[in-house]
Image (cartoon, rainbow, N blue to C red):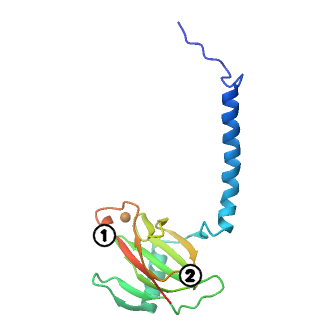
Amino acid sequence: MSIETPKNWWKPLNKEERIWLYIVGVWAVILTIMMPYGHTRDHNISNETWKTTTKAYTAVSKAFIKKYKIGEDERGVPIVDARNIPEGKRGADIFLIATRAWQFKPHFILKKDKKYRIHMSSDFYEHGFSLQPMNLNYQILPNRDFVVTMTPKQSGKFMIVCNEYCGPGHHNMFTTLEVKE
Ligand SMILES: [Cu+2]
């Protein structure tokens, strides 16, 4: 005995199937339009990804921290005051690094209404960048310089936490982003 399956199962299409396919098609068009629309309406933040190396990014991050460091927290994580960094045409470049000892460096102090390009990369594992309570989420990868352009419009202290499980120190992985007038 054998089970017979029709060669072209979609022939003929019945009414329900046709309605369903129509809905799917219309929804696909709506979602496609929403991507560029969301971008123009500030729903999606502009971002870029560049190739780098862990060595090159670590060097850039170290130099950046050295130049703008104003102190350290109790865990030895540097605090960087990025309020007076030159803004340039596309925004002020600031650098976040996720390190293999489960740390983010540095803490940032940013100026309200100033445009920033936040670079992020990792020197070993994959990590996550989750800005709370705004709930912006990105991946941080070694050998990739991921850049988010943003202008903080609200002063206060925000948390950056790792949202990609990265090992035993994952739950301790956080830093802060403070926005001042
Ligand atoms: Cu993690």
Q: In the rendering, at what x and y percent does residue 83 appear?
A: 50, 90
Q: In the rendering, at what x and y percent does residue 132 appear?
A: 43, 70
Q: Which residue is mark 1?
A: 172
| On screen, residue 24 above or below 91 | above
Q: Which residue is mark 2?
A: 116
Circle 1 Cα neighbour tier, 10 Å, few/some/many (<14 / 14–19 / ≥20):
few
Left or right of residue 58: residue 22: right
**What element does badge 1 sit on?**
helix
| On screen, residue 80 above or below 170 | below
**What element does badge 2 sit on?**
strand
Q: Residue at x 59, y 69 (%)?
A: 45
Find the distance from the CA under tag 1 to the CA under tag 2: 26 Å
Q: Residue at x 44, y 70 (%)?
A: 133
Kind of residue sitting beneath label 1: Asn
Count the numbered circles shown.
2
- Of residue 23 and residue 96, the one placed in the foreground of this image is 23
Left or right of residue 134: residue 91: right
Circle 2 Cα neighbour tier, 10 Å, few/some/many (<14 / 14–19 / ≥20):
many
Left or right of residue 42: residue 179: left
Quadrant containing ligand 1: bottom left
Residue 4: image quadrant is top right
